[in-house]
Amino acid sequence: MEIPPEWATESFCYVTTTGRRSGTPHTIEIWFGLAGDSMYLLAEGKERADWVRNMRADPDVTVKVRDVTFPAKARFVDDADEEEAVRRTMAAKYQDWTEGTPMSDWARSALLIALDPI
């Protein structure tokens, strides 16, 4: 699936993970950014967040934006160039960040996760 570029202005999406212990679906509403063919999430709670732990155990998720639901695979971003670009995108979208100003702790240090549509 190709992610429509107009989704970049949407405020949030819904991500459903599979519970690592229960095996049942768990859905969160969360902010997201787009870059290339991926959606990105920032987890302020990092590894403490249940949804992050669920993605570590099973990276297959379901994403809903507007009235479109699709499968995706979560991956934890470890490429420095990808990470920097996405953090800037998220900070600009949600915190009116501009080049040359400091980013918030959230934008600078939250765990970055990509969702790649399947």
Image (spheres, rainbow, N blue to C red):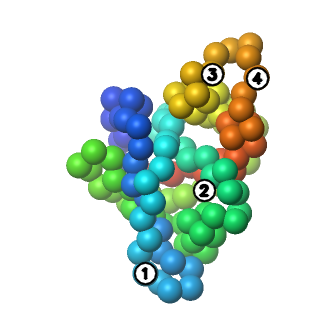
Picture disc at residue 102: 4
**Of discs 4 and 2, which sits in the foreground?**
4
Give the percent coordinates (x, y) of residue 78. Answer: 73, 48
Q: Residues within 10 Å of mark 1 (few under 14, many from 20)?
A: few
According to the picture, the residue beneath numbered tag 2 turns out to be: 75
**Of discs 3 and 1, which sits in the foreground?**
3
CA distance for labels 4 and 2: 27 Å
Give the percent coordinates (x, y) of residue 68. Answer: 26, 50
CA distance for labels 3 and 4: 8 Å
**Which numbered disc, 3 or 2, marks the residue that appears first in the sequence?**
2
Q: Is residue 29 above or below residue 53?
A: above
Which residue: 41% across, 31% down?
8
| SS for dot 1 | loop
**Which numbered disc, 4 or 1, marks the residue that appears first in the sequence?**
1
CA distance for labels 3 and 1: 37 Å
Give the percent coordinates (x, y) of residue 12. Answer: 41, 43
Residue at the extreme top: 100
Q: Is residue 118 visible?
A: no
| SS for dot 3 | loop
Q: Amino acid at mark 2?
A: Arg
Picture disc at residue 41: none
According to the picture, the residue beneath numbered tag 1 turns out to be: 24
Give the percent coordinates (x, y) of residue 36. Answer: 50, 34
Q: Residues within 10 Å of mark 2 (few under 14, many from 20)?
A: some
**Which numbered disc, 4 or 2, marks the residue that appears first in the sequence?**
2
Marks 3 and 4 close (CB-CB < 8 Å): no
According to the picture, the residue beneath numbered tag 3 turns out to be: 97
